[in-house]
Image (tube, rainbow, N blue to C red):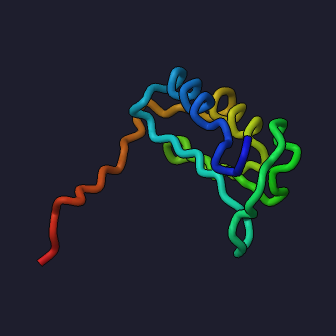
């Protein structure tokens, strides 16, 4: 992993979508928990040198959690979330204009 942007989310997202489907509302957003920009430089392949304040904002339908490591976020999506088959998605129509 050369930078924070190289976190291997794609494989994890594929696994989660494989369980819940692509149309279920799910979000994983990695962010640094401070007002500073992410540091430049290289990070170790084993994630030991990732910033300590790297967090993962996760949403599943109407459930929200924040994790300090990706393994916990993955476990939450695959083992702990409660799927609601009646959950309706909020769709925003950006083509409408206000006059």
Does 68 sit left or right of 87 as displayed?
right
Q: Vertical placement of 39 versus 27: above or below?
A: below
- 70 or 41, which is in the foreground? 41
Depicted 73 relative to depicted 40: above or below: above
Q: Residue furthest top?
A: 18
Q: Residue furthest left?
A: 99
Q: Using residue 68 as the reference point, say whether residue 20 is left or right of it.
A: left
Q: Name the side, left or right, on which 77 lies relative to 60.
A: right
Residue 58 x %, y %: 61, 47
Q: Quadrant of the rendered structure where residue 1 is?
A: top right
Residue that appears at 73% across and 61% down? 40
Please tell me which residue is depicted at 66% across the width and 43% down the height of the picture. 6
Query: Which quarter of the rendering shows the C terminus?
Result: bottom left
Residue 65: x, y in percent?
66, 49
Front residue of this view, candidates 86 and 25: 25
Q: Residue at the location (30% across, 50% down)?
A: 91
The residue lying toward the viewer, choosing from 14 and 60, is 14
In the displayed structure, 57 sits above or below 17; it is below
Q: Position of residue 38 (x, y in %)?
A: 71, 64
Quadrant of res 19: top right
Count the marks: 0
Q: Quadrant of residue 37?
A: bottom right
Q: Which residue is pictured at 59% across the width and 45% down the height?
A: 28
Specify the farthest residue to the bottom. Answer: 99
User: Is 86 located above or below residue 40 in the figure?
Assistant: above
Q: Nearer the viewer, residue 20 or 49?
A: 49
């Amino acid at each position: 992993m050369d930078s924070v942007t190289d976190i291997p989310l794609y494989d994890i997202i594929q696994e989660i979508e494989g369980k819940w489907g692509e149309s279920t509302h799910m979000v994983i957003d990695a962010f640094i928990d401070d007002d500073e920009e992410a540091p430049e430089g290289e990070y170790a392949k084993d994630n030991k040198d990732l910033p300590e304040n790297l967090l993962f904002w996760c949403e599943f339908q109407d459930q929200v959690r924040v994790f300090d490591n990706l393994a916990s976020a993955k476990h939450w999506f695959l083992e702990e979330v409660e799927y609601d088959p009646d959950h309706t998605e909020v769709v925003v129509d950006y083509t409408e204009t206000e006059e």
